[in-house]
Image (cartoon, rainbow, N blue to C red):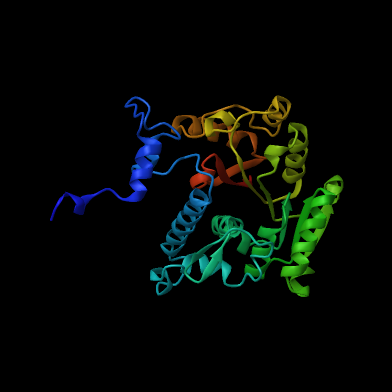
Amino acid sequence: MNSEDYNKSKLWKINLEKNFGNFNIKSFREIGGPNKKLGSWDPMEHSLRYFKSLLYAFADHLDTTIREDLKTLSASDSKNRGAGINFYLDKVNKMNLGNPVTVSFYGKELSIDYVLSVEEMYFLDKTLNNSEIVLEIGAGFGRLAHAVIENFENINEYIICDLPEMLAVSQNFLSTVLTKKNFSKISFISNDHFHSITEADLCINIDSFQEMPSEVVKNYLNGISSYAKYFYSKNAICKYNPNLIGIKINDSGEYKSALEQGLCTNEFDIYNSSDLMKAQDIYFEKYCPSNFSLLKDKQSFGQYLFYHSALFHRNL
């Protein structure tokens, strides 16, 4: 053995030249600093690494949670990795239409859209099993409607209320992924005809009340309080400063407008546990329909920590 047997690699010659020529002990761990080469990732790295890692961790966490709940799965299934996720997704066909980013998880190619749908169905499982009419306000492309219709045969009607332009998207998607029989269970109502809806066991709003003027949200909540048995909200519990996550504000008008939308307009640090607890209490109060009470709640996972699932039920 001689000293040449321990020479630095060509890769590390390059790293040392690029990153450690002017080493500063006071700043080497800052974003973009040389510490990114000492075992940790650069928080500002432009790749799918963080997204895919969080997506996989989300799926794994959710799968473990479901498998540990023996009320949902049989004891034999509870030990099989992937059985929790598959419990809700085995019946869901064509869920990767649109070419989303996915991770391979125990026999399934999972996108964030349908992992979120599993989280929502698991949280609402008992309520969905006891519902015949479901109303979703702002359904996006229809991911949750797709998953719920395939899993809960007891649901006779799934109403989607949305902007006309978005109804065209969800109609296109759902008519492609569902059988004619299941697609026939879905009713599409434009937002300006919301007042025509008079019945629903469960009303759902995910990630959209926060994007509406406060008066519009209150109008929806008033309608929900007049006929629904349950209301499920999964929205951002507060506003935050984009600088907190490294996003520069290029349009101050757009930023100001975003701060004014929804009912939870207070700005909090979304990575501060004390702030999140304060924001949660405000959220529960603001999004509770009249004559309803909070039945249960759950903080969302990972990158969605400032989102919260809340199920409200009508007071008897």
- Please tell me whether residue 312 is drawn above or below residue 172 in the rendered image: above
State which quarter of the image contains the N terminus.
bottom left
Q: Position of residue 194 (x, y in %)?
A: 83, 47
Give coordinates of residue 107: x percent, y percent: 50, 72
Total marks shown come to 0
Position above or below: 2 against 219: below
Image position, residue 298 (x, y; %): 51, 46
Depth check, front residue: 70 or 80: 80
Please indicate whether residue 68 sits to the left or right of residue 209 in the image. Answer: left
Q: Residue furthest left?
A: 1
Seen at 70% across and 28% down, the residue is 251
| Position of residue 231 in the picture relative to residue 219 (left or right) | left
Which picture quadrant has residue 178? bottom right
Image point (67%, 28%), residue name: 250
The residue sitting at 35% across, 32% down in the picture is 21
Q: Say whether residue 95 is left or right of residue 56.
A: right
User: Would residue 96 be visible to someone looking at this image?
Assistant: yes
Residue at point 70% right, 25% down?
252
Name above or below for residue 41 compared with residue 141: above
